[in-house]
Image: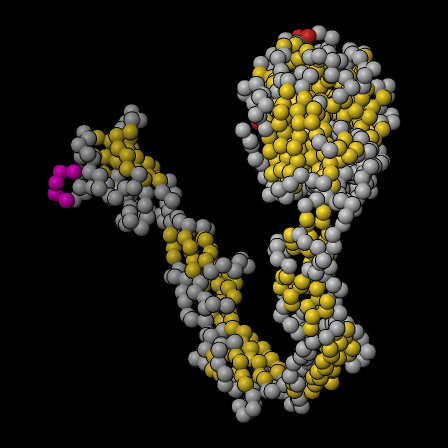
């Protein structure tokens, strides 16, 4: 059974934001810690971290290391368990988090631990996933291992401790300090739970730093300096403390990777293939019981090239890592390149190896192996493309590979024929291959045209606006410019009238052009619309430039194009007059007014009570209004007796009016003291006031014992006793216009 994977070339480069250089090839560099005082200070980060989370690293525990070796601690300093800590010993590895409520007891922490055989002195990939307090998992080399929970806290992880800092290789807890002893590489922190597939797909492959949920990614590939760069989007860069050493990493990391973790036991028929159309790598004859195989590809030549003839080798190189928790298994590796075996193979265990060894076959490999092909033999073949070529004024050119040897051709364009046709400038290479032998040659093809120069047409202008002269639209590298003033720039700034010329010289010849910008004679335009005008009681007014129409154009803001216009509304009017080279504008304000129209505030009034009323002054637009109290509104609210006047004024005249409100005082001359309601219409009703509509009064009538027997708030001379018994009664009249009146009234 075979599994094919297409590899995509990917190279990582050093960030220009760092002065440090990096080693981007394969697993690059790692940090080696002495177990005494070395660690990485990441500062105050992850104060808002919650579950779920994933943390992983490539770990090489020193043979002399013992006890707790901290890999990563997210919060370290407070005298309570908080944040999470990821650690390894010679017997197990574990992850735990604290609830921030105390220390020294398992009730304040929760985690998971897995025991395994001593893995000191070898590179392993450790990964921990914490989904919740009751759902955690530990992975060794991509395999979920059996584990047991530790601690009994059921509270969430506490992370908000601003004075605590994250550290790599250092942990302080229960008054004890622990340091990591060994090497660490490719430490990653995620704020989500990775799946089994994601762990296996990324453990042997470089990340871009932009993966979803990635909040920390330290690959330690810097070759010098004290800064450790975080390649995630968080940029939590760290500082080396103590003296951690930068060393070549032996972790199994490439630019691309593929894997196989079979559900059933391995058999001799099981194989894994890496193919891209040229390279094919087969892992086969697996013996023993590895739980998985990781195959990675590095798209570059190795950083350490001892034992290699660099003229004979080409990228990429490959690595194999047998995954799982056990030992005692082997496998064979078969490399096919372009359908045949490479002329030679070079091998080493991992990226730490400074020297490559030539091997005939790759069999009986245990756990780790990196392999690089060599394609040159002792009997070389040759291919020649001839000298570099300059092609003038031709759309294409044939390029032929000449050789005295037999073989197959491969061009940089992908063609496989001895001759190709090219139509663009650039470097073209051809590779001649014959079995294990190959040769390669490159030719630079440069397509050029004789310069075709144009500065445009001559112009006669009233005014010369600044412009740029660009004799050619595109500027090849070989063009040289010579302007009339001795300047040599490809674009010339023109600011004055005159004659301009340029000569352009290229590899394929020379061309020249001249242009002239001449000034056109100018004629002035002079006119005046006059001062601001106010027109009273007229339907229109004429505005005129007093200029003849011949040889001029007129542009009024009304849209008119005549020397004069009639205007009928108030406004601001402007006109621009132009001749061939000159223009002038003028503006005038015209106010169309009418005299104020007569109006009245109403008749004078004498009333008992003054009710609030509104006086209105009629005024044309733009007129001023002035009341006797200084107010200027068109209306005036009146509540008091008195004399009121208003003046309406504009530029065309003045209108005034006055109104007076006088209080009425009425003293009754005669109030009857007897009524005879017997139906003969004589003294039938009590006539208190001759005109009750003009002088409103209120009437109350009482009997001899002071009891009210009649009441009318607005008496209308319509009371005739109301069926009361004959006798003597007493009346009480009140009103706003009369003094209070009391008296005796007899009903007969």
Kindly indicate the quadrant of the structure image that contains residue 250. Answer: top right
Kindly indicate the quadrant of the structure image that contains residue 483. Answer: bottom right
From the viewer's side, name the closer residue of 720 and 154.
154
Residue plotted at (43% across, 65% down): 618
- Position of residue 687 measured from the top left corner of the image (x, y, whole percent): 24, 44
- Position of residue 283 measured from the top left corner of the image (x, y, whole percent): 63, 29
- Position of residue 279 measured from the top left corner of the image (x, y, whole percent): 64, 40
From the viewer's side, name the closer residue of 257 and 364.
364
Which SS does the magenta portion mostly show? loop
- 11 with respect to 271 (left or right): right
Residue 63 visible to an observer of this rendering:
yes
Residue plotted at (47% across, 75% down): 569
Query: Would residue 663 be counted in the magenta stretch?
Result: no
- 611 with respect to 401 (left or right): left
The answer to whether 198 is drawn above or below residue 436 in the figure is above
Residue plotted at (79% across, 30% down): 352
Kindly indicate the quadrant of the structure image that contains residue 522. Answer: bottom right
- 64 with respect to 5 (left or right): right
From the viewer's side, name the closer residue of 337 and 134.
337
Q: Which span of residues is magenta-colored?
A: 677-681
Residue 526 visible to an observer of this rendering:
no
- Position of residue 90 measured from the top left corner of the image (x, y, whole percent): 75, 13
From the viewer's side, name the closer residue of 150 and 186.
186
Image quadrant holding the C terminus, namely top left
Image quadrant holding the N terminus, namely top right
């Amino acid at each position: 059974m075979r599994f094919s994977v297409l590899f995509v070339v990917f190279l990582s480069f050093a960030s220009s934001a760092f002065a440090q250089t990096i080693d981007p090839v394969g697993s690059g560099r790692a940090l080696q810690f002495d177990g005494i005082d070395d660690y990485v200070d990441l500062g105050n980060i992850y104060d808002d971290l919650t579950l779920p989370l994933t943390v992983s690293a490539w770990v090489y525990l020193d043979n002399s290391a013992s006890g707790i070796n901290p890999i990563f601690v997210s919060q370290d300093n407070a005298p309570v368990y908080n944040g999470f800590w990821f650690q390894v010993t010679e017997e197990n590895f574990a992850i735990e988090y604290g609830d921030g409520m105390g220390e020294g007891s398992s009730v304040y922490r929760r985690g998971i631990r897995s025991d395994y055989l001593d893995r000191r002195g070898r590179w392993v990939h450790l990964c921990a996933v914490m989904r919740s307090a009751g759902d955690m998992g530990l992975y060794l080399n991509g395999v979920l291992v059996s584990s047991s929970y530790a601690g009994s806290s059921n509270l969430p992880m506490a992370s908000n401790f601003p004075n605590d800092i994250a550290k790599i290789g250092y942990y302080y807890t229960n008054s004890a300090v622990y340091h990591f002893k060994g090497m660490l590489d490719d430490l990653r922190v995620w704020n989500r739970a990775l799946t089994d597939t994601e762990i296996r797909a990324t453990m042997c492959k470089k990340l871009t730093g932009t993966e979803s949920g990635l909040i920390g990614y330290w690959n330690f590939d810097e070759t010098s300096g004290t800064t450790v760069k975080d390649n995630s989007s968080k940029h939590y860069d760290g500082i080396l403390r103590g003296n951690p050493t930068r060393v070549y990493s032996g972790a199994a990391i490439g630019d691309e990777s593929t894997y196989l973790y079979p559900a059933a036991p391995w058999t001799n028929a099981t194989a894994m293939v890496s193919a891209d159309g040229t390279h094919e790598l087969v892992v086969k004859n697996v013996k023993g019981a590895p739980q998985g195989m990781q195959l990675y590809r590095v798209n570059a030549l190795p950083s350490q090239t001892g034992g290699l003839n660099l003229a004979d080798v080409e990228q990429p190189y490959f690595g194999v890592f047998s995954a799982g928790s056990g030992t005692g298994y082997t496998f064979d590796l078969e490399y096919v390149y372009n359908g045949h075996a490479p002329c030679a193979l070079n091998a080493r265990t991992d990226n730490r190896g400074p020297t490559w060894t030539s091997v005939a076959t790759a069999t009986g490999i245990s756990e780790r192996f990196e392999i690089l092909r060599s394609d040159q033999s002792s009997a070389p073949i040759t291919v020649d493309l001839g000298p570099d070529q300059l092609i003038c004024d031709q759309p294409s050119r044939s390029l032929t590979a000449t050789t005295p040897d037999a073989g197959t051709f491969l061009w940089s364009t992908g063609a496989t024929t001895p001759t190709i046709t090219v139509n663009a400038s650039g470097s073209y290479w051809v590779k001649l291959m014959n079995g294990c032998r190959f040769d390669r040659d490159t030719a630079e093809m440069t397509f050029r045209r004789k310069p075709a120069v144009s500065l445009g047409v001559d112009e006669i202008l009233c005014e010369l606006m600044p412009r740029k002269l660009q004799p050619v639209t595109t500027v090849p590298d070989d063009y040289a410019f010579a302007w009339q003033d001795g300047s040599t720039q490809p674009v010339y700034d023109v600011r004055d009238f005159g004659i301009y010329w340029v000569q352009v010289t290229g590899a394929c010849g020379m061309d020249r052009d001249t242009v002239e910008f001449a000034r056109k004679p100018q004629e002035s335009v002079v006119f005046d619309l006059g001062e601001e005008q106010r027109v009273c009681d007229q339907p229109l007014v004429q505005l005129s430039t007093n200029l003849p129409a011949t040889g001029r154009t007129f542009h009024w803001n009304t849209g008119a194009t005549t020397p004069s216009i009639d205007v009928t509304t108030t406004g601001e009017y402007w006109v621009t007059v132009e001749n061939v080279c000159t223009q002038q504008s003028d503006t005038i304000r015209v106010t169309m007014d009418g005299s104020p129209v007569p109006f009245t505030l109403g008749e004078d009034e004498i009333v008992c009570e003054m009710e609030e009323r509104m006086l209105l002054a009629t005024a044309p637009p733009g007129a001023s209004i002035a009341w006797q109290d200084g107010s200027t509104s068109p209306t005036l609210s009146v509540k008091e007796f008195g004399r009121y006047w208003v003046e309406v004024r504009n530029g065309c005249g003045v209108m005034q009016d006055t109104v007076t409100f006088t209080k009425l005082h009425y003293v009754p001359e005669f109030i009857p003291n007897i009524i005879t309601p017997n139906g003969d219409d004589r003294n039938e009703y009590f006539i208190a006031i001759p005109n009750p509509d003009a002088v409103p009064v209120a009437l109350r009538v009482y009997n001899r014992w002071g009891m009210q027997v009649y009441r009318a708030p607005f008496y209308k001379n319509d009371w005739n006793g109301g069926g009361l018994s004959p006798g003597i009664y007493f009346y009480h009249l009140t009103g706003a216009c009369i003094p209070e009146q009391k008296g005796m009234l007899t009903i007969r």
